Amino acid sequence: MTDKPSLQDRLVAAGFGIGWAAVPRLPERLATRGFDAAADRLWKRRGKSVLRLEANLARVKGTSPDDPVIRELSRAGMRSYFRYFHEVFRLPSIPREEVVARTHLTGAERIMENLEKGRGVVLALPHMGNWDAAGAWLIGASGMPFTTVAERLRPESLFRRYTAFREGLGMEVLPLTGGEGSTFGTLAQRLRAGRAVCLPAERDLTAKGIEVQFFGAATRMPAGPGLLAVHTGAALLPALPYFKGRDWGLDIAEEIEVPAEGTRQERTAAAMQSLAVAFEKGITEHPEDWHMLQRLWLEDLEPRPVRER
């Protein structure tokens, strides 16, 4: 039995529904100004999300959250974050050929050469830029669908809307929890069939992830990308999306080398640490496009309440 959605949950779901229906009909420049203005209003309020973004960016930049540089960077970050949602609402109406033409790539051959050889590819992404546009590029450029995993949002109606949006772009979407069968097993099957799997990978949602060093402090990353590469022999490629003017940039970094020796856990941990290093490079180059408004590092996490027995 699922919890009844709160009024706030229902309003958020309704807002997304209105966004998908109305935003594509608005002039793009007018809508852009509106989303920028909304981002600026939220930034000026200095609520918890903005303060958390500033704390995270300060760790990336190696400075204090009080540094004026961080304050300006967080404003750009909020505008980037709101641009993502603007584009989510508009993306279904953008022809796939236009998405491909407006995506500026480095390292695309690292994906295509593996897929052409029938070798599966795990594309691991941080929450940067517009990862949905990056997925639309991959489908348009390769002509092949790929599989991804989605967090089960609240309320269920919002999860279904987001799933329908991504499926409309050509993705196969598996729920992180509550789905039929084994999500990991399905992903492994797709990889063994020589297909691509795309997974957000710098924020662990299960509290069972792999501990890594990230910008000089410990955090947990989901084990899935590294474990799938170990389990199936698929290529593990960091994918780093960002905004490039009004277009999109996407850097496909060098394949993460999975150690041949060691236990499965040791090999997975080594792969995830190498992935963390690749993410550091991408985030450092485009910090304003890293949409991390949540607690990430272990020392920042609030302790989980102890259940009484």
Image (tube, rainbow, N blue to C red):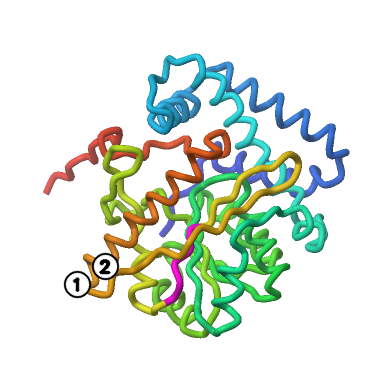
Residue sitting nearer the eye, 241 or 157:
241
Residue sitting nearer the eye, 126 or 10:
126
Disc 1 and disc 2 in contact, CB within 8 angstroms: yes
Instruction: Tell me which residue sits at (48%, 61%) in the image.
Output: 254
Residue segment shown in magenta: 234-238
**What amino acid is found at the position of numbered circle 2 in the picture?**
Arg
Q: Position of residue 87 (x, y in %)?
A: 71, 46
Instruction: Check disc 1 and report the residue beneath it.
Output: 263
Q: Position of residue 12 (x, y in %)?
A: 60, 41
Instruction: Tell me which residue sits at (65%, 49%) in the image.
Output: 249
Residue 229's disc is none
Q: Position of residue 184 (x, y in %)?
A: 39, 73
Instruction: Tell me which residue sits at (61%, 45%) in the image.
Output: 242
SS for dot 1: loop
Q: Is residue 228 above or below residue 162?
A: below
SS for dot 2: helix
Q: Dominant secondary structure of the magenta stretch?
A: strand
| Magenta segment includes 243 | no
Q: Is residue 127 above or below residue 228?
A: above
Task: Judge left or right: residue 301 versus residue 119.
Answer: left
Q: Is residue 68 above or below residue 175?
A: above
Instruction: Tell me which residue sits at (64%, 27%) in the image.
Output: 39
**What amino acid is found at the position of numbered circle 1 in the picture?**
Thr
Task: Judge left or right: residue 257 versus residue 290.
Answer: left
The quadrant in which residue 19 appears is: top right
Q: Position of residue 57 (x, y in %)?
A: 45, 30
Task: Judge left or right: residue 174 versus residue 16.
Answer: left
Instruction: Check disc 2 and report the residue beneath it.
Output: 267
Q: Is residue 163 above or below residue 3?
A: below
